[in-house]
Image: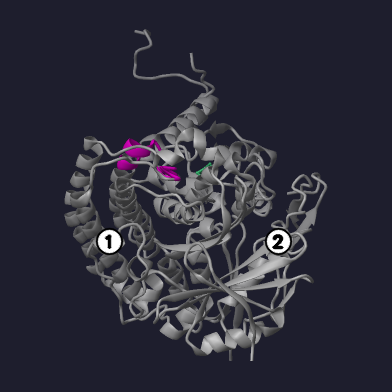
Amino acid sequence: MYKIISEETDKSGMKVLNIDKSDLIELMEDYKDRKYFLSSITGVDMKDHIDVIYHLHNFDKNDYICVKVSTTDEKVPSITKLWKAAIVDEREQYDLMGITFEGHDNLRRILLPDDWVGHPLRKDYDLNKVQYVSVDRDGNEHVSFDDKEGW
Amino acid sequence: MSHWIELNIGPVHPATHGIYRFRVKLNEETVEDVDITIGYLHRNAEKICELNYFVNNTIYFDRMDYIDAMNMEVGYLRAVETLIDMEVPERAQWIRMIMAELSRIAARMVGIGALGLDVGMLTPFFHTFHEREKIQKIFVEASGGRQEVNYMSIGGVYQDFNDKIIEEIKEFIAGFKGKLEEMVKMFTDSEIFWQRNVGTGVLEPDIALDYGVTGPMLRASGIPYDVRKDSPYLFYDKVNFDVPIARTKDNMGRFLVKVEELRQSVRIIEQCLAKLPEGPYFNPKAKKSAMLLLKGQGDVFTRVESESGEFGVFIRGDGGVKPYRVHARSPSFKNLAVVPIMTKGSLIADLIITIASVDAVAGEVDR
Amino acid sequence: MKTGDMGVKTTTLEKALEWGRSNSLWPLTMGLACCAIEMMATQAADVDVARFGSEIFRNSPRQSDLMIVAGTTTKRMAPRLKRIYEEMPYPKYVIAMGVCVIQGGPYVDGYSVVLGVDKVVPVDVYVPGCPPSPQALTYGLITLQKKIRNETDR
Ligand code: SF4
């Protein structure tokens, strides 16, 4: 059985459950049985750790809850087996925030080219390092820091 | 014997409605698999929002679902105002509601017009854009902007409604009612439109829920979920309107749901105009000089019903004058992800019409 | 007899070509973002760019000679945009529509937007605005026509 570390209500009146990473799948399975559906996944870079925030929604009871886990090694278990909505959401968070979802079959970048360097929504991402994208004849994208190679 | 073809559609293609790339695996004319590549319009709005003051970020939300700017603003401001505990005066809330519904109509006009273009009907496009132009005139009168309006700000709206604007809205509503029926008739009288829409792009409700689909697409699958009804914001609990659903789950159902929602929007605007109270149109706590000093602490996640579905905004504030993290749960992003399921096993021509009826907006998919 | 008013006007071949070109610009639908909707509005009934001979928005680069870059060009899109430009036949012209395409606009602080499409393709006319109104785009088109005809505003 999973353990809820703490429970609170946030400013918008939503119930927030703080749990440990290892309990995530179990809790999500429980909520899936209670007819909750995944609404969104958000990653927040807190410099020393990353918060991953899941919003679940029950259409019958019209209830929204928020599940928070935090991770120091940028890894959390994937919940794509439970809800298909997680496929694109986890890919997006992997792309922009660099969270590895373990167990996701197709964890590729979704918004940026495949070999983009760095994860832009991290707080330590350097905006001054400009990257350029070029496309070769076969349609593969290449990223470089040299503006002569761009487009 | 099967004959495999891999077909590339996009990124720039009239049928994609924005810039996506569809790689379609065809077995003769039957779609076996669709691989959607997005990200050609990734404009890093979420990152830029972290660099700006709370009040400045409205413009990036305007440009997310760029055809439905007012609803995006309502969505962002609902989150920010919850975060920084800002009250909004009543009149401002009613004004916001009128504008949001007008914007919804304007957005649908683009969507329906483009749907017509995709089935080869050029005429409705000119009619829908003519109506949209009238709404944009009202927006110009109120805010100065035609499309990316930046009309609402924290604690109220930029400018009060004067009699001229109210008169214009009334005039528009009076004309629009008849015009809408006329436009819908253009579609439904056409045999081709029926043939191409009925029975194509079927989306079962359990798949829709599993993929996080919301908005008209979910309602066309038979689930009456509308944020305006289920967790009312602004004053949606004080007006009467119905949430239409369709049982056919196909493209035609989606079209009819969208049309019925336009009628409901008209109904809402009429009630709002009747109830519009007198009073201030912005909260004096949020006057211009104080705007940059507004601070927020904690997490919020709020949702509104935008043109394409449930638009949620997550904001974490660290007690400073800028948001620590902004995340938008964009409905089009989820709605687009279900296209491969909807079109599996259908003809390639049905794929095009399904993409048009999903009506994803690139700016919101990629943000 | 030879007074010259026989209903004949003499001109150089070049002038005639320029006149023809400038009045039948066929734009390519290069709608990338928000500005694309305003480009559609330019085409629609109220503004009706057909008055200036540009009503036929072509979807194929091989059939068009004017590229209206409407909307933010991201780094990922730029190589594709360039390729489409290269596929257009000569003579070809480019209108940059919107501040995003001119210098980055609201997204100038970010990491994935090309700061000015003129770094990718040569631009003839810039139409500022966010988004520019259909009237502004029409004015840009007229300016381009004047440019093709080698006329100057005086
Ligand atoms: S200039 Fe403004 S309206 Fe046009 S694409 Fe850029 S952000 Fe959108």
The magenta stretch spans residue B152? yes
Task: State if disc 1 and disc 2 touch (CB < 8 Å).
Answer: no
Indicate left or right for A55 with A117 as reference: left
**Residue that carries the numbered disc 2 in the rendered image:** A45
Q: Which residues make up the magenta segment?
A: B138-154
- Give the residue displayed 49% in from the left and 29% down from the top: C145
Q: Is residue B270 above or below residue B293?
A: below
**Residue that carries the numbered disc 1 in the rendered image:** B262
The magenta stretch spans residue C39? no
State the image quarter where residue C7 is shown: top left
Amino acid type at circle 1 is Leu
Q: Secondary structure at mark 1?
A: helix
- In this figure, what is the number of numbered marks? 2
Q: Residues within 10 Å of mark 1 (few under 14, many from 20)?
A: many
In the image shown, does C92 or B276 lie closer to the viewer? B276
Tell me the subunit letter for badge 2.
A
- Give the residue displayed 29% in from the left and 50% down from the top: B94
Q: Are marks 2 and 1 on the same chain?
A: no
Indicate left or right for C39 with B280 as reference: right
Q: Secondary structure at mark 2?
A: strand
Residue B196 visible in rendering: no
Q: Position of residue B329 (x, y in %)?
A: 53, 64
Indicate left or right for B353 with B246 as reference: right
Amino acid type at circle 2 is Asp
Give the mark toward the camera: 2 or 1: 2
Q: Residues within 10 Å of mark 2 (few under 14, many from 20)?
A: many
Residue B18 visible in rendering: yes
Locate the C terminus of chain B and report the quarter of the image it occupies. bottom right
- Give the residue displayed 45% in from the left and 36% down from the top: B287
